[in-house]
Image (spheres, helix red, strand yellow):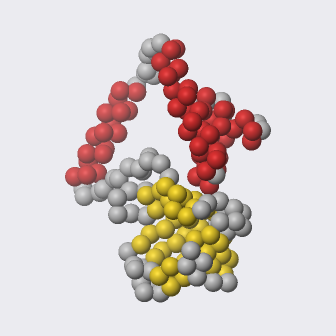
Amino acid sequence: MTDKLLPEQFAIGLLSPRERADATRQRLCDAELDLAITNLEATLSPLAGMAGCIEPPAGLRGRVLNAVSKTHSNEAQGKLHQPFVSGAWRNVFPGVDVKQLWASGPKLLRCAPISAIPAHEHLEDEYLAVLAGDFSIEGCRYELGDYLFSPRGTRHEQGTTQSGCLLLLHEG
């Protein structure tokens, strides 16, 4: 598989489950790849119904009903499930996009290589984790799995990335 064909192979379903999972992770960090796949899926989606109707796999109805029943049981126990928001990424700074994961919850920040997040003051406590790539701020370099807590009222200098990064940000 070549990277040049990745959007097409993803959109038409030619990737193995492992390759598709890898491409999905890569898509979070690569705005161009994400846009290419989104555009191809939109272009190809009208073709989806042309194959005609097929019978669902045996036992599918039972599995769906079981999953719904389990969800209701979890809700009765006070457990809360909030689905991932599938909305678009919003550009907030040059090379930096943000996506809200769920209402009042964390956000993903997708930073292109050699991009920057401007200096800012924290109005709330801020929790930041690096999910991919590198992120440098105030002389410290953070990589995969590294975590930074900044209390309310503190200030950050400009943050930068060399290779690009995906950050998980939670305020509050």
Task: Locate residue 20: give its quadrant.
Answer: top right
125 relative to 49, above or below: below
93 relative position to 132: left or right: left
Count of picture labels = 0
Task: In the rendered view, tell whether residue 92 sits above or below residue 39.
Answer: below
- In percent of width and height, residue 90 lies at 49, 55
- Which quadrant is home to the N terminus? top right
Q: Residue at x 39, y 79 (%)?
A: 124
- Pick out the residue farthest to the bottom: 154
Question: Quick one: 23 or 112, which is closer to the camera?
Answer: 112
Determine the residue positioned at 46% across, 62% down.
107
In the picture as drawn, the residue positioned furthest to the front comes out as 94
- The answer to whether residue 17 shows anywhere in this view is no
Residue 43 position, x and y percent, is 55, 28
Q: Quadrant of the C terminus?
A: bottom left
Up-down relation of residue 141 to residue 24 (above or below): below
Residue 119 at what x, y percent from top left? 55, 79
Residue 75 lies, in percent from the top left, at 25, 52
Does residue 164 sit above or below 123 in this rendering?
above
Q: Residue at x 34, y 53 (%)?
A: 81
Is there any visible trace of residue 80 in the rendered image?
yes
Residue 42 as seen in the image, left or right of residue 160: left
Residue 33 sits in which quadrant?
Answer: top right
Residue located farthest toward the top when viewing the structure as drawn: 52
**Residue at the image position 42 percent from the left and 87 percent from the top:** 153
What is the residue that sits farthest to the left in this orientation?
Answer: 76
Is 46 positioned to the left or the right of 72 in the image? right
